[in-house]
Image (cartoon, grey):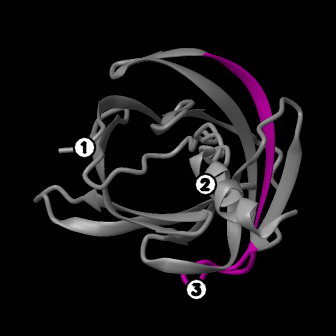
């Protein structure tokens, strides 16, 4: 190519608009089945009493979100209740009533599929012997509570402490972004406030 055409070619190339690289599509937000906003408050109704939980702290590191929840005593004083890690493969309980588990306890295993089963064995300093949790995903349906109606997934759990066998299964119901809305026969969500 003759040298005198180089400046013309350069002008043509500069005049052609550059095509921007395609933007990656935002991936849809995965359902957490747990409250993840500081200040979110859950009031549970027991047979004769109520119990209030408040999200104290939320920390996001990479693909793990750690959520710390306090419960309020009768005089309104916050006490550590539980800490969970929300990961891509599930929700794991790492601490309860101020006591850490030596192995995170898998509360929910993602993706949630009816019939899926899993077990976790863990120790906690205040409990005698290891605790074995056997969980199974049940049905998904709309559950009515005093706090409203929620589409929730049922998780059945058999708990054995210190080698004692347990055939009884407790039924827990979890709703997206809210968390536990009902523990059959024990407590039901009475009031849910996403944040203060």
Residue 180 placement, left or right of 21 = left
Residue 11 is marked as 2
Secondary structure of the residue carrying numbered label 2: helix
**Residue occupying image coordinates x 71% and y 56%:** 9
148 and 31: which is toward the camera:
31
Secondary structure of the residue carrying numbered label 1: loop
**Quarter containing the C terminus:** top left
Q: Are marks 1 and 3 in contact (CB under 8 Å)?
A: no
Quadrant of the image occupied by residue 114: top right
Mark 1–mark 3 Cα distance, whole angstroms, equals 32 Å
Secondary structure of the residue carrying numbered label 3: loop
Label 1 sits on residue:
195
How crowded is the residue under tag 2: few (<14 C-alpha within 10 Å), some, or many (20+)? few
42 and 25: which is toward the camera:
25
What x and y, as percent, mark residue 154?
A: 68, 30
How crowded is the residue under tag 1: few (<14 C-alpha within 10 Å), some, or many (20+)? some
Number of the front mark, 2 or 1: 2
What x and y, as percent, mark residue 81?
A: 39, 64
Count of number-bearing discs:
3
User: Compared with residue 100, is residue 192 higher up or lower down, i.e. above or below?
Assistant: above
Does the magenta segment cover residue 134? yes
Mark 2–mark 1 Cα distance, whole angstroms, equals 57 Å
Quadrant of the image occupied by residue 102: bottom right
Q: Which residues are magenta?
A: 122-141
Label 3 sits on residue:
125
Does the magenta segment cover residue 139? yes
Q: Earlier in the sequence, mark 2 or mark 3?
A: 2
What x and y, as percent, mark residue 82?
A: 46, 64
**Quarter containing the N terminus:** bottom right
**Residue occupying image coordinates x 88% and y 45%:** 117
Quadrant of the image occupied by residue 120: bottom right
Residue 37 placement, left or right of 172 = left
């Amino acid at each position: 190519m003759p040298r005198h055409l180089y400046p013309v070619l350069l002008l043509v190339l500069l005049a052609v608009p550059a095509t921007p690289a395609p933007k990656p599509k935002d991936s849809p937000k995965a359902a957490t089945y747990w409250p993840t906003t500081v200040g979110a408050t859950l009031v549970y109704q027991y047979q004769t009493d109520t119990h209030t939980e408040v999200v104290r702290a939320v920390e996001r590191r990479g693909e793990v979100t750690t959520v710390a929840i306090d419960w309020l005593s009768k005089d309104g004083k916050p006490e550590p209740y539980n800490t969970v890690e929300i990961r891509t493969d599930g929700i794991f309980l790492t601490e309860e009533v101020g006591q850490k588990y030596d192995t995170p306890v898998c509360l929910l295993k993602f993706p949630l599929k009816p019939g899926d089963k899993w077990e976790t064995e863990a120790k906690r300093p205040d409990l005698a012997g290891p605790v074995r949790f056997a969980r199974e995903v049940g049905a998904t349906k709309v559950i009515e509570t005093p706090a409203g109606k929620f589409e929730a997934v049922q998780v059945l759990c058999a708990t054995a402490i210190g080698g004692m066998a347990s055939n009884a299964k407790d039924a827990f119901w979890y709703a997206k972004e809210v968390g536990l809305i009902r523990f059959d026969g024990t407590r039901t969500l009475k009031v849910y406030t996403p944040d203060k």
